[in-house]
Amino acid sequence: MTTADDHTLLRRAIALAATARESGNPPFGSLLAAPDGTVLAEEHNTTLTDRDITAHPELKLARWAARELAPATAAETTMYTSCQPCGMCEAVIRQAGLRRVVYALSNEQLLDIRPGSGRPPVPQDGPALLDEVRAAVEPYYR
Ligand SMILES: [Zn+2]
């Protein structure tokens, strides 16, 4: 459930999406907010101008939060984003330990606007060479 305060911050994320589009990038914008609504950081998509397929605003902000915020502060921080985070960004947001994500446009709604944008999964083969990989990995965790 979103509130009027959420909508105020979502409107800022949507404005950042417009900034992305105006700068020649796909139209996605996001921000991080403290519990009192203070904006901590803002980003917009720069995948084209940076020639970086990972330059989604949600991923850049999650990395920023993990680097710049104490874990307890991150756990109180909300991400507001113009579109629901993709799978890549969702995983990094989880790693950053953010409290909550509030989005305007769902991924399903985005597919209605931009059909055919999904990519097939890349095949993965494994596990293999268990003894060899365990020798490399296990000492780290012991
Ligand atoms: Zn993403």
Image (tube, rainbow, N blue to C red):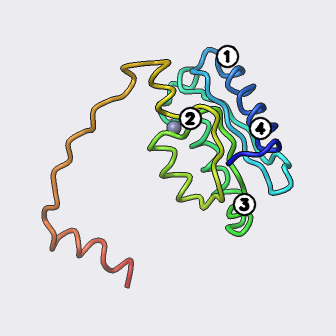
First of labels 2, 4 by sequence position: 4
Q: Amino acid at mark 3?
A: Leu
Give the crowd class for mark 2: few <14, some 14-19, many >=20 residues within 10 Å: many
Query: On screen, 113 above or below 101?
Result: above
First of labels 1, 3 by sequence position: 1
Q: Which residue is mark 4?
A: 7
Q: Amino acid at mark 4?
A: His
Position of 40 with respect to 101 (left or right) is right
Q: Do the residues bearing badges 1 and 4 touch, measured as CB atoms within 8 Å?
A: no
SS category of the residue bearing label 2: loop
SS category of the residue bearing label 1: loop
Q: Amino acid at mark 2?
A: His
Query: On screen, 111 above or below 126?
Result: above
- The span from disc 2 to disc 4 (Cα, nearest Å) is 21 Å
The residue furthest bottom is 142
First of labels 1, 4 by sequence position: 4
Which of 84/131 is in front?
84
Looking at the picture, how far across and down is residue 7, in whole percent? 77, 38
Q: Is mark 3 within 8 Å of ligand 1?
A: no
- The span from disc 1 to disc 2 (Cα, nearest Å) is 14 Å
Looking at the picture, how far across and down is residue 15, in whole percent? 75, 25
Residue 69: mark: 3
Residue under the point 84% across and 49% down: 37
Residue 56: mark: 2
Q: Do the residues bearing badges 1 and 3 touch, measured as CB atoms within 8 Å?
A: no
SS category of the residue bearing label 4: helix
Q: Is mark 2 within 8 Å of ligand 1?
A: yes
First of labels 1, 2 by sequence position: 1
SS category of the residue bearing label 3: loop
Nearer the viewer's eye, disc 3 or disc 4?
4
Query: On screen, 127 above or below 4?
Result: below
Q: Which residue is mark 1?
A: 23
